[in-house]
Amino acid sequence: MKYTIMLVEDEPPILYAIKQLIESGNYGFTVIATAQNGRDALKALEGHAPDVIITDIQMPFMNGLDLIDEVHRRQPQIKCVILTGYSDFEYSRKALRSNAYEYLLKPIQVEQLRALLESLRETLNKSRMQAEQTTLNNAIFFEQYAKLDLTNLSNRLLAPMIICAGHYAHETWYADHPGRKFWEQTEHLETIQKYSDNCDLWILNGFTPNERIVIFGLDSLDHSSIDAFAIKLMQQLSKGQIPIQMIYGGPVPQINELSNAIKKLRTAFAQKIVFGASGIFGEAKRSITPFIIPSNDDNRFVFLAQHKNLDSFKKDFLLLLNEWESKKYVQAWIETLLQNLTHKLAQVHHAELGELSQSSLIVSEVLSISTSYSELFENYCRFIRVIYENTEHSLTDISAAEIVAQMEKYFQNNFTSAISYKMFYDLFGFNETYLSHVFKLQRGITPNKYVTKLRIEKAKEMILLQPDTHLKKIAAQVGYDDAFYFSRVFKEMTGISPSEFIKHSKDQTKL
């Protein structure tokens, strides 16, 4: 992408000499406007919005320092460079202490000009990328569409891809999802950039901690390069111990179509992922047939549920998992099967599992945090242990209500810190699945979601007290490093975005 420059100099020979140096040097800049004083420069600015202004100091009508101050007031994103001689160096120092980006010393040296333009280009690239990231985040997660003139998104076809480290997660608050740790290793994001073959792409956090969304900027409908990219990327990312899933769709011509396109991809993704294996999937081209539990499996679930102790259950359950693995069942099917098995167990052992939606969410979580069938076996059996313990009355003397009360107190005092189930085990002496289960039965909400609720309530309180506080600061103070992720969670919990909440609170104070 080429950036633009406006030159402001009252001596025409110097003006055109600099223009010639810039345009003949292949620095990635184009001079789109010139002026011989600050007054004319401001007038030209009404029709041209350059990325950079290089201006002399001593000029008639309006000097360079006043010009920089006025440009900063009107369009602060423009980078201003002072063109100065030794005699004006004190003016330059004053400008640098205020709104100037850098200075360029007369007579112009080619090496000095090159270094300045390289520095400017790097700074402008970073600013553009930040603007593009913000624009895409707002478009995808909040369906808010800003002007694209200052970005590299206008007149581009945008093709979405979702990369899932581990298995599909339904909830944003699965704090212990192994995919979260995968993406904390920055080399994986660097690998995505490396294999882009110089194609414009943007990497965003996904709807859940184990997802990343990649948006490709294309110039034509031909997106065959994405096929090759996906294959090369899979070879690199799948070298670890966690399955990698990718799904991508065709390009959309308008940014306001991107949010819906990604939602459709996620819906297809949830039905396509083969549990325990990595995979690359194209956009869904046919309707997906609903999974119906075979009658013979239903009978086997009753047989399994009738086992009198957990050890006996484990032996037969392991055989069942081995069969599912050999048949390459997709994650969605296994989720349905495990939910059915869980309720058969509850019925046979007269165990209280709470509402159907609650136990279903726990099964979903057990599946999503497991990276293999062996982990699924261990995690599900820890969950099912609750049913057998309730049946056999083998729990310790501490009651579920007392455990939940201690957990709740701990959350209320530590909700801004990172909290994991492993921490709960150290504190209370029970495995994480049991703790999650009893907490949800007692409070009707998972521990992670409870912590999220505490964080959002605290954020709302802070916004009401100080509505002009930057969202990034509020997010950090309630435990979120990523302001965009905080904004998405805030909207999920409250139904409105933080910016809408701020506006509403300000409107209320005016009444």
Image: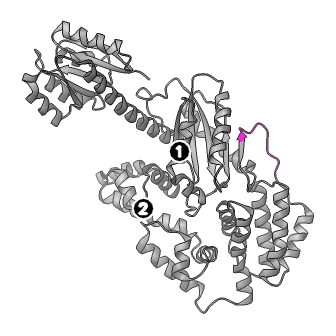
Three-letter code, disc 1: Leu
| Range shown magenta | 281-290
What residue does disc 1 label?
Answer: 189
Few, some or many C-alpha atoms within 10 Å of disc 1 (few <14, some 14-19, many ≥20)?
Answer: some
Helix, strand or loop for disc 1:
helix
The answer to which of 432 and 102 lies nearer the viewer is: 102
What residue does disc 2 label?
Answer: 479
Residue positioned 24% across, 9% down in the render: 17
Q: In which quadrant will I find the N terminus? A: top left
Q: Is residue 282 magenta?
A: yes
- Measured as percent of width and height from the top left, residue 271 is found at 74, 49
Q: Is residue 278 magenta?
A: no
Few, some or many C-alpha atoms within 10 Å of disc 2 (few <14, some 14-19, many ≥20)?
Answer: some
- Measured as percent of width and height from the top left, residue 280 is found at 71, 42
Q: Residue furthest top?
A: 13
The answer to which of 47 and 78 lies nearer the viewer is: 78
Residue 123 location, quadrant: top left
Residue 239 lies, with reference to residue 418, above or below; the image says: above
Regarding residue 157, the answer to whether it shows in the image is: yes
Helix, strand or loop for disc 2:
loop
In front: label 1 or label 2: 1
**Residues at marks 1 and 2 touching, judged by CB atoms closer than 8 Å:** no
Three-letter code, disc 2: Gly
Pointer 1 or 2: first along the chain: 1
Q: Is residue 215 found left or right of 314 in the rendered image?
A: left
Residue 18 location, quadrant: top left
Residue 135 lies, with reference to residue 471, above or below; the image says: above
Q: Magenta segment, principal secondary structure?
A: loop
Q: Is residue 330 found left or right of 235 in the rendered image?
A: right
Regarding residue 511, the answer to whether it shows in the image is: no
Residue 425 lies, with reference to residue 169, above or below; the image says: below
- Measured as percent of width and height from the top left, residue 101 is found at 24, 31
